[in-house]
Amino acid sequence: MDKNYALEYLNENEFRKTERAIKKYNMLAYKKLLFDYYPALKDGDFKGAVVSKNEKEKITQYELKLPTDLSFSKVHGDITLHYTVYEKQGIIILDKLSPEDILKEGSHKELTTYKGVMVSKSHAEKDMFKINLLNMLEK
C-alpha cells in the first residue's frame, strides 16, 4: 500500500495524557508505539485485530495490543491502542489507549508500584490483592 495516511485524534489532550503515562511506566510499549506502529500506520500498514468494518464507507476499527508486562496485564489488562481508519479520506483517528483508568490516573499523579506492578491510588487494596494472588498461583 503506497497511500500515506494522516494521524488525527478523537481527543488529542486525553490521548496525549495516556500516552505520557505509557512513556513513564512502560518505555518498551511507548517506543514500539512511536517508532514502529505510528510510522507503519501512516504507511497504510494497519496492525492489530479488526474490531468492526463498514465496507460501504471504507471505515475499519482496530485494536492493537502493545508490549505489556505479564503482571500488569493480569492486574489491569493489556495496553491497547484503539484506532479507526477512514480509507476514503486517508485519515487514521487515534481513539484511545486502554486501560484508561490506570493510565489516566498515572498521568495525573505519581503511582506507586507493588512487586513491580503499578498500583492505583483509588483501589490500591484491590490491585495489591490481585498481585498477591497471582504471585501465590505462580509458586
Image (cartoon, rainbow, N blue to C red):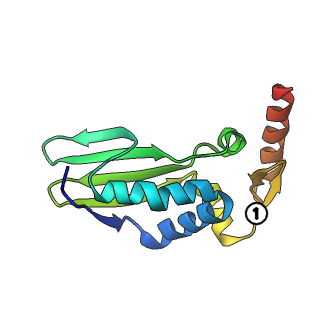
Callout 1: helix, strand or loop?
A: loop
Nearest to the observer: residue 134 or residue 6:
6
Q: Which residue appears at 68% of the width and 38% of the height?
A: 74
Q: Which residue appears at 35% of the width and 54% of the height?
A: 40
Determine which residue is flagged by label 1: 111
Residue 123 drawn above or below residue 8: above
Left or right, 39 with reference to 71: left
Left or right, 108 with reference to 99: right
Q: Which residue appears at 80% of the width and 53% of the height?
A: 124
Q: Which amino acid lies under the numbered mark 1 shown in the image of this protein?
A: Leu
Relative image position of residue 102 (x, y in whole percent): 65, 56
The C terminus - image quarter: top right
Question: Quarter of the image holding residue 106?
Answer: bottom right
Left or right, 20 with reference to 114: left
Q: Which residue appears at 50% of the width and 69% of the height?
A: 16
Circle 1 crowding by C-alpha within 10 Å: few under 14, some 14–19, many from 20: some
Question: Quarter of the image holding residue 78?
Answer: top right
The total of numbered circles placed on residues is 1
Relative image position of residue 80 (x, y in whole percent): 51, 48
Relative image position of residue 3 (x, y in whole percent): 18, 57
Relative image position of residue 130 (x, y in whole percent): 78, 39
